[in-house]
């Protein structure tokens, strides 16, 4: 997001001095480099929401960007498969949503038609979504950084923000690479966006909760079981899409991700535990409200996380031929999901202006897809509310 926003500033305001501060010693070391690489079509999101609007336009812009800059991508389409009778109404609802969001070519197909697209998948019916694609967002991020630098901006790594001082005519940002004075500050710190917001003296009114997504890889001999992307019908109560199969641009097929509460903001493994992160989560009233409402689902996600058999069982609903020996442990990523004090997960993207500072607080999936359009939306807002010109 930071790079997407900075690229838009560099293009629209070439005379502004622009600095991107990154705490790691390289870019895309967290969510943007640990995701499924899907260019989402926009079928899932509530019509009129920022997610819907920015994803549909963002997907087209992402495909165009990849084409223009020679980044591997593949508009392969996907199928969302209903495997239980009670999921059929959800499938019809997704088609309605997608059409309301302006998607073309959506088709509810029979199980026979599903087999023409994905010969090994089974289901009662499916929704074929032709505009979904895949790319590699780490490469996209690298290209954003390259273009920012070419347009006169600077991307400074190993420069984690440690303090923010708001003075009358300037904002001073402290990092291990020095203190920087600026007129405008845009916070796109992903898993730490709420903490950076507090560091700037603001109350984001939300807490970022880390949800780890774990993947298995299909062994290469079994990768031909999946031609493109096979998804379940998602549970509408959650912003996560359910474990699915993704054929990456490299040809590798992975299965996942699940959604398990991580015990550290950058908790990529079970053993990653951070006392400060846990304490701040447990002291947030919204956490206990969320836990009270969703503990059953949380337990079954944990079970699926520690039991390969349970993970495989979820996948077999989509692809019955899959078995445990076809899968080997893959990577993981951690989603930054904003939680409200009432215990609900923030559904839409959230951009919160405060004086000369703008906080990009909740940008979970499909934000990688929508990153060019989020960049435009955030810079529009910055131009208006921060007076950036
Ligand atoms: C498992 C998983 C699967 C996903 N699949 C998809 C998908 O298929 N398609 C899709 O569109 N989206 C997907 N997403 C969502 C997408 O990856 C994210 O929405 C997007 O990458 C968010 O970008 P970001 O810049 O906000 O966060 P990040 O990529 O995490 O970047 C935040 C940056 O801020 C830096 N930072 C943090 N604190 C500081 C500090 N104090 N000072 C300086 N820098 C700091 C971090 O080091 C990091 O580089 C997925 C996410 C996950 C985790």
Image: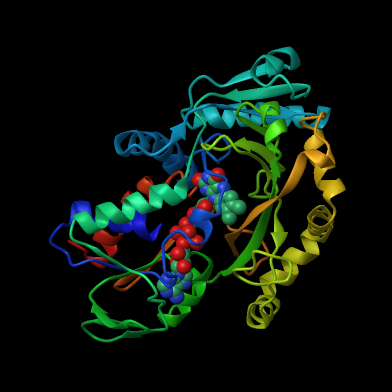
Q: Disc count in the image? A: 0
Viewer-side residue, 376 vs 39: 39
**Residue 185 image position (x, y, % from top left):** 31, 71
- Which picture quadrant has residue 370? top left
- The colour scheme applied to this rendered structure is rainbow
Determine whether, in the image, residue 371 is placed left or right of residue 328.
Answer: left
Residue found farthest to the front = 221
Viewer-side residue, 76 vs 129: 76
Q: Could one spot residue 64 in this view of the protein?
A: yes
Determine whether, in the image, residue 99 is placed left or right of residue 86.
Answer: left
Determine whether, in the image, residue 335 is placed left or right of residue 123.
Answer: left
Query: Residue drawn 81% across and 34% down?
Result: 316
**Residue 371 image position (x, y, % from top left):** 40, 49
**Residue 262 image position (x, y, % from top left):** 69, 66
**Residue 227 image position (x, y, % from top left):** 62, 26
Query: Residue drawn 48% across and 41% down?
Result: 52
Q: Could one spot residue 363 in this view of the protein?
A: no
- Which picture quadrant has residue 187? bottom left
Q: In which quarter of the image is the N terminus?
A: bottom left
Viewer-side residue, 278 vs 332: 332
Residue found farthest to the left = 15
Residue 360 to residue 349: above or below? below
Q: Quadrant of the C terminus?
A: bottom left
């Amino acid at each position: 997001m930071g790079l997407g926003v900075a690229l838009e500033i560099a293009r629209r305001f070439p005379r502004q001095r622009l600095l991107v501060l990154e705490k790691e010693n390289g870019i895309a070391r967290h969510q943007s480099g640990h995701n499924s690489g899907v260019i989402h079509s926009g079928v899932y999101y509530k019509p009129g929401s920022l997610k819907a609007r920015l994803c549909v336009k963002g997907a087209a812009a992402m495909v165009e960007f990849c084409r223009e800059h020679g980044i591997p991508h593949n508009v392969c389409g996907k199928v969302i498969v209903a495997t239980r009778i009670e999921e059929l109404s959800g499938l019809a609802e997704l088609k309605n949503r997608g059409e309301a969001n302006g998607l073309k070519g959506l088709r509810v197909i029979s199980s026979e038609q599903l087999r023409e697209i994905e010969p090994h998948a089974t289901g009662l019916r499916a929704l074929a979504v032709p505009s979904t694609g895949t790319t590699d967002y780490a490469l996209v991020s690298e290209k954003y950084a390259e273009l920012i630098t070419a347009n006169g901006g600077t991307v400074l790594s190993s420069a984690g923000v440690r303090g923010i001082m708001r003075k009358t005519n300037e904002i001073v940002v402290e990092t291990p690479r020095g203190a920087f004075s600026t007129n405008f500050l845009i916070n796109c710190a992903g898993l730490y966006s709420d903490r950076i917001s507090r560091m700037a003296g603001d109350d984001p009114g939300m807490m970022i909760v880390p949800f780890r997504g774990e993947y298995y890889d299909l062994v290469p001999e079994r990768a031909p079981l999946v031609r493109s992307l096979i998804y379940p019908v998602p549970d509408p109560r959650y912003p996560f899409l359910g474990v699915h199969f993704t054929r990456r641009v490299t040809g590798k097929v992975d299965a996942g991700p699940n959604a398990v509460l991580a015990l550290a903001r950058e908790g990529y493994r079970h053993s990653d535990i951070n006392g400060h992160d846990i304490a701040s989560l447990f002291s947030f009233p919204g956490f206990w409200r969320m836990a009270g409402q969703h503990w059953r689902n949380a337990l079954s996600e944990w079970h699926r996380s520690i039991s390969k058999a349970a993970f495989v069982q979820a996948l077999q609903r989509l692809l019955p031929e899959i078995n445990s020996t076809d899968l080997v442990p893959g990577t993981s990523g951690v989603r930054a999901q904003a939680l409200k004090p009432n215990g609900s997960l923030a559904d839409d993207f959230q951009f919160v202006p405060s004086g000369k500072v703008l906080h990009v607080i909740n940008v979970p999936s499909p934000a990688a897809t929508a990153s060019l359009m989020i960049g435009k939306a955030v810079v529009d807002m910055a131009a208006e509310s921060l007076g950036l010109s």
